Image (cartoon, rainbow, N blue to C red):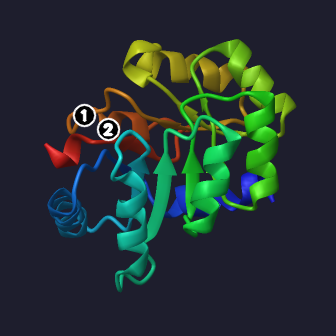
Amino acid sequence: MKQNGIHDILSKNEVIPVATIHNYEELLLQLEKIQHASISCIEITLRTDYALTAIEKIKKMDLPDFKVGVGTVICPEQIEIVHALDVDFIVSPGLTEKLVSELHKSGIPFIPGVSTVSEIMKALEWNCTFLKFFPAHLSGGIDALNTYGQLFPSVIFCPTGGITSSTYNDYLQLKNVSSVGGSWMFK
Protein backbone atom coordinates (compact mmCIF):
# COMPACT_ATOMS: atom_id res chain seq x y z
CA MET A 1 0.00 0.00 0.00
CA LYS A 2 1.58 3.25 -1.16
CA GLN A 3 2.66 5.52 1.66
CA ASN A 4 0.57 3.56 4.16
CA GLY A 5 -2.70 4.39 2.42
CA ILE A 6 -2.45 8.18 2.06
CA HIS A 7 -4.47 7.95 -1.16
CA ASP A 8 -7.59 7.05 0.85
CA ILE A 9 -7.33 10.23 2.91
CA LEU A 10 -6.48 12.51 -0.02
CA SER A 11 -9.22 11.10 -2.24
CA LYS A 12 -11.87 11.75 0.43
CA ASN A 13 -10.64 15.24 1.35
CA GLU A 14 -10.19 17.74 -1.49
CA VAL A 15 -9.50 20.49 1.03
CA ILE A 16 -7.19 19.92 3.97
CA PRO A 17 -7.27 22.79 6.47
CA VAL A 18 -3.79 23.51 7.82
CA ALA A 19 -4.03 24.90 11.35
CA THR A 20 -1.44 26.39 13.66
CA ILE A 21 -3.17 26.30 17.04
CA HIS A 22 -2.05 28.17 20.16
CA ASN A 23 -4.79 27.40 22.70
CA TYR A 24 -8.07 25.56 23.36
CA GLU A 25 -10.29 28.50 22.37
CA GLU A 26 -8.55 28.78 19.01
CA LEU A 27 -8.92 25.02 18.53
CA LEU A 28 -12.68 25.16 19.10
CA LEU A 29 -13.08 28.16 16.80
CA GLN A 30 -11.15 26.51 13.99
CA LEU A 31 -13.03 23.22 14.35
CA GLU A 32 -16.29 25.13 14.16
CA LYS A 33 -15.21 26.79 10.90
CA ILE A 34 -14.17 23.44 9.44
CA GLN A 35 -17.42 21.74 10.39
CA HIS A 36 -19.43 24.68 9.05
CA ALA A 37 -17.67 24.18 5.71
CA SER A 38 -18.47 20.42 5.80
CA ILE A 39 -14.78 19.49 5.88
CA SER A 40 -13.91 16.27 7.69
CA CYS A 41 -10.18 16.58 8.38
CA ILE A 42 -7.52 18.90 9.75
CA GLU A 43 -3.74 19.10 9.69
CA ILE A 44 -2.32 20.48 12.94
CA THR A 45 1.17 21.89 12.40
CA LEU A 46 3.90 21.27 14.95
CA ARG A 47 4.69 24.99 15.10
CA THR A 48 3.35 25.76 18.58
CA ASP A 49 3.75 24.38 22.08
CA TYR A 50 0.01 23.60 22.04
CA ALA A 51 0.01 21.46 18.87
CA LEU A 52 0.29 18.05 20.54
CA THR A 53 -2.34 18.97 23.11
CA ALA A 54 -4.64 20.11 20.32
CA ILE A 55 -4.25 16.74 18.59
CA GLU A 56 -4.99 14.90 21.85
CA LYS A 57 -8.12 16.97 22.44
CA ILE A 58 -9.49 16.44 18.93
CA LYS A 59 -8.84 12.69 19.09
CA LYS A 60 -10.93 12.54 22.31
CA MET A 61 -13.89 14.40 20.74
CA ASP A 62 -16.87 12.59 19.27
CA LEU A 63 -16.17 13.34 15.60
CA PRO A 64 -17.02 10.25 13.54
CA ASP A 65 -15.02 9.88 10.33
CA PHE A 66 -13.01 13.04 11.12
CA LYS A 67 -9.31 12.67 10.25
CA VAL A 68 -6.63 14.37 12.34
CA GLY A 69 -3.26 14.82 10.73
CA VAL A 70 -0.06 16.38 11.89
CA GLY A 71 2.08 18.68 9.78
CA THR A 72 5.56 20.14 9.86
CA VAL A 73 7.04 16.76 10.75
CA ILE A 74 10.74 17.12 10.03
CA CYS A 75 12.48 14.35 11.99
CA PRO A 76 11.97 10.70 12.96
CA GLU A 77 11.63 11.56 16.66
CA GLN A 78 8.43 13.47 15.89
CA ILE A 79 7.01 10.42 14.13
CA GLU A 80 7.34 8.41 17.35
CA ILE A 81 5.58 11.13 19.35
CA VAL A 82 2.62 11.53 17.00
CA HIS A 83 2.30 7.77 16.54
CA ALA A 84 1.46 7.57 20.26
CA LEU A 85 -1.30 10.16 19.68
CA ASP A 86 -2.91 7.92 17.03
CA VAL A 87 -2.84 10.55 14.28
CA ASP A 88 -4.53 9.62 11.02
CA PHE A 89 -1.89 11.05 8.70
CA ILE A 90 1.47 12.84 8.66
CA VAL A 91 2.59 15.71 6.44
CA SER A 92 6.19 16.85 6.05
CA PRO A 93 7.35 20.06 4.36
CA GLY A 94 10.25 18.18 2.77
CA LEU A 95 11.89 14.80 2.54
CA THR A 96 15.10 13.07 3.48
CA GLU A 97 15.93 9.41 3.00
CA LYS A 98 15.93 8.78 6.77
CA LEU A 99 12.62 10.58 7.32
CA VAL A 100 10.86 8.81 4.44
CA SER A 101 12.19 5.44 5.61
CA GLU A 102 10.78 6.02 9.10
CA LEU A 103 7.48 7.27 7.67
CA HIS A 104 7.10 4.07 5.64
CA LYS A 105 7.86 1.99 8.77
CA SER A 106 5.38 3.93 10.94
CA GLY A 107 2.29 2.48 9.30
CA ILE A 108 0.72 5.96 9.34
CA PRO A 109 -0.42 7.42 6.00
CA PHE A 110 2.01 10.18 5.00
CA ILE A 111 2.80 12.74 2.37
CA PRO A 112 6.28 14.28 2.08
CA GLY A 113 6.91 17.71 0.62
CA VAL A 114 8.75 18.63 -2.57
CA SER A 115 9.22 21.71 -4.68
CA THR A 116 11.83 20.77 -7.29
CA VAL A 117 12.35 18.19 -10.04
CA SER A 118 15.26 16.63 -8.14
CA GLU A 119 13.15 16.26 -4.98
CA ILE A 120 10.37 14.58 -6.99
CA MET A 121 12.92 12.18 -8.46
CA LYS A 122 14.20 11.35 -4.96
CA ALA A 123 10.65 10.80 -3.75
CA LEU A 124 10.03 8.36 -6.60
CA GLU A 125 13.26 6.49 -5.73
CA TRP A 126 11.91 6.16 -2.17
CA ASN A 127 8.55 4.80 -3.38
CA CYS A 128 6.53 7.99 -2.84
CA THR A 129 4.09 9.07 -5.55
CA PHE A 130 1.75 11.23 -3.44
CA LEU A 131 3.57 14.47 -2.67
CA LYS A 132 2.92 17.78 -0.99
CA PHE A 133 3.95 20.60 -3.35
CA PHE A 134 5.28 23.24 -0.98
CA PRO A 135 5.42 26.19 -0.97
CA ALA A 136 3.18 26.19 -4.03
CA HIS A 137 3.01 29.95 -4.54
CA LEU A 138 6.80 30.36 -4.37
CA SER A 139 7.60 27.24 -6.39
CA GLY A 140 5.77 28.01 -9.62
CA GLY A 141 2.18 27.25 -8.65
CA ILE A 142 -0.16 25.95 -11.32
CA ASP A 143 2.38 26.39 -14.13
CA ALA A 144 4.93 24.23 -12.30
CA LEU A 145 2.34 21.54 -11.56
CA ASN A 146 1.30 21.46 -15.23
CA THR A 147 4.93 20.89 -16.20
CA TYR A 148 5.45 18.29 -13.46
CA GLY A 149 2.37 16.46 -14.73
CA GLN A 150 4.06 16.01 -18.10
CA LEU A 151 7.38 14.93 -16.55
CA PHE A 152 5.95 12.71 -13.81
CA PRO A 153 2.55 11.33 -14.86
CA SER A 154 2.44 8.88 -11.92
CA VAL A 155 2.79 11.60 -9.27
CA ILE A 156 -0.22 13.09 -7.49
CA PHE A 157 0.18 16.37 -5.62
CA CYS A 158 -1.38 18.16 -2.69
CA PRO A 159 -0.23 21.78 -3.10
CA THR A 160 0.00 23.99 -0.02
CA GLY A 161 1.52 27.35 0.72
CA GLY A 162 -0.10 30.49 -0.60
CA ILE A 163 -3.32 28.75 -1.69
CA THR A 164 -6.29 31.09 -1.25
CA SER A 165 -10.07 30.97 -1.44
CA SER A 166 -9.82 32.39 -4.96
CA THR A 167 -7.15 29.93 -6.21
CA TYR A 168 -7.79 26.56 -4.59
CA ASN A 169 -10.36 25.48 -7.20
CA ASP A 170 -7.89 26.27 -9.99
CA TYR A 171 -5.44 23.82 -8.40
CA LEU A 172 -8.14 21.17 -7.98
CA GLN A 173 -8.84 21.31 -11.74
CA LEU A 174 -5.37 19.91 -12.48
CA LYS A 175 -5.24 16.19 -13.32
CA ASN A 176 -2.24 15.62 -11.04
CA VAL A 177 -3.78 17.31 -7.97
CA SER A 178 -6.00 15.33 -5.61
CA SER A 179 -6.26 17.80 -2.72
CA VAL A 180 -5.14 21.24 -1.63
CA GLY A 181 -4.03 22.33 1.80
CA GLY A 182 -4.17 25.75 3.34
CA SER A 183 -5.32 28.06 6.06
CA TRP A 184 -7.49 30.45 4.03
CA MET A 185 -10.70 29.14 5.62
CA PHE A 186 -9.52 30.34 9.05
CA LYS A 187 -9.11 33.97 8.01
Residue at the far front in the pictured view: 49
Using the rendered view, name the quadrant where residue 26 is placed: bottom left
Using the rendered view, name the quadrant where residue 40 is placed: bottom left
Please tell me whether mark 2 sits on a helix, a strand or a loop.
Answer: helix
Q: Residue at x 43, y 23 (%)?
A: 136
Q: Is residue 181 left or right of residue 10?
A: left
Q: Is residue 28 left or right of residue 19?
A: left
Q: Residue at x 57, y 38 (%)?
A: 92
Q: Residue at x 45, y 13 (%)?
A: 140
Q: Residue at x 24, y 69 (%)?
A: 35
- Is residue 180 visible in the rendered image? The answer is yes
Q: What's the distance in space between the residues labelled 2 and 1, CA to CA?
A: 6 Å
Measured from the top left, where is residue 170 in percent x and y?
34, 34
Measured from the top left, where is residue 57 in percent x and y?
35, 72
- Residues 58 and 127: in front is 58
Cβ atoms under marks 2 and 1 closer than 8 Å: yes
Marking on residue 136: none
Density class for disc 2 (Cα within 10 Å; few <14, some 14-19, many ≥20) is many
Kind of residue indicated by mark 2: Tyr
Q: Is residue 78 left or right of residue 45?
A: right
Using the rendered view, name the quadrant where residue 137 is placed: top left
Please tell me whether mark 1 sits on a helix, a strand or a loop.
Answer: loop
Quarter holding the N terminus? bottom right
Measured from the top left, where is residue 93 in percent x and y?
54, 31
Kind of residue indicated by mark 1: Thr
Density class for disc 1 (Cα within 10 Å; few <14, some 14-19, many ≥20) is some
Quarter holding the C terminus? top left
Marking on residue 168: 2
- Is residue 128 visible in the rendered image? The answer is no
Q: From the image, tell me which residue sits under label 1.
A: 164
